[in-house]
Amino acid sequence: QVQLVESGGGSVQAGGSLRLSCAASGSIRSINNMGWFRQAPGKQRELVAGITSGGSTNYVDSVKGRFTISRDNAVNTMYLQMNSLKPEDTAVYYCNAMIQTDSGPVRVYWGQGTQVTVSS
């Protein structure tokens, strides 16, 4: 069994910061690409930022310069540092990872989501 557990969400005022964490646990052999997605009410889920196993990153244009994605492969954890938050960043944030377990092929796993609310 593999689990992704997010933490770090909450409520902040515009201009504030939050740091999200996503910890993977279970019978993990390797973790390939990881990413943060978000879904606002009435909108489709979108990719916010992604990171490869080697550390290459990509961001949606709306968060470039404000958000930073990183990972610590030693503890199977990914982070999203969010600065200069805006009300339009309000959403449920989900982590996502391509994981190979000890007993199966590579597949995509999702966390349960963490709410981020930014007030103006």
Image: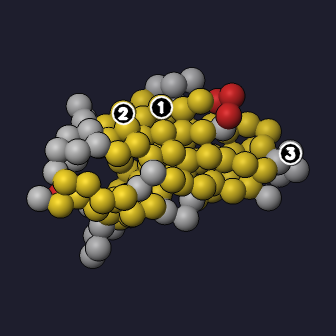
- Left or right side of 50 for 120: left
Pointer 3 or 1: first along the chain: 1
Mark 2: which secondary structure? strand
**Which class describes the residues within 10 Å of circle 2: few (<14), some (14-19), or many (20+)?**
some
Mark 3: which secondary structure? loop
Do callouts 2 and 1 mark residues in contact (Cβ within 8 Å)?
yes
Q: Which residue is mark 1?
A: 70
Residue 24 showing in the rendered view: yes
Q: Quadrant of residue 100?
A: top right
- Left or right side of 120 for 107: right
Q: Which residue is mark 3?
A: 102
Q: Which residue is mark 2?
A: 68
Residue type highlighted by circle 3: Asp
Q: Nearer the viewer, mark 2 or mark 3?
A: 2
Of the 4 image quadrants, the one containing the C terminus is: bottom left
In the image as oriented, which residue stretches furthest toward the left? Answer: 120
- The residue depicted at 23 percent of the width and 45 percent of the height is 16
Q: CA distance from mark 2 to mark 3?
A: 30 Å
- The residue depicted at 69 percent of the width and 28 percent of the height is 74
- The residue depicted at 57 percent of the width and 59 percent of the height is 111
Q: CA distance from mark 3 to mark 1?
A: 25 Å
Residue type highlighted by circle 1: Ser
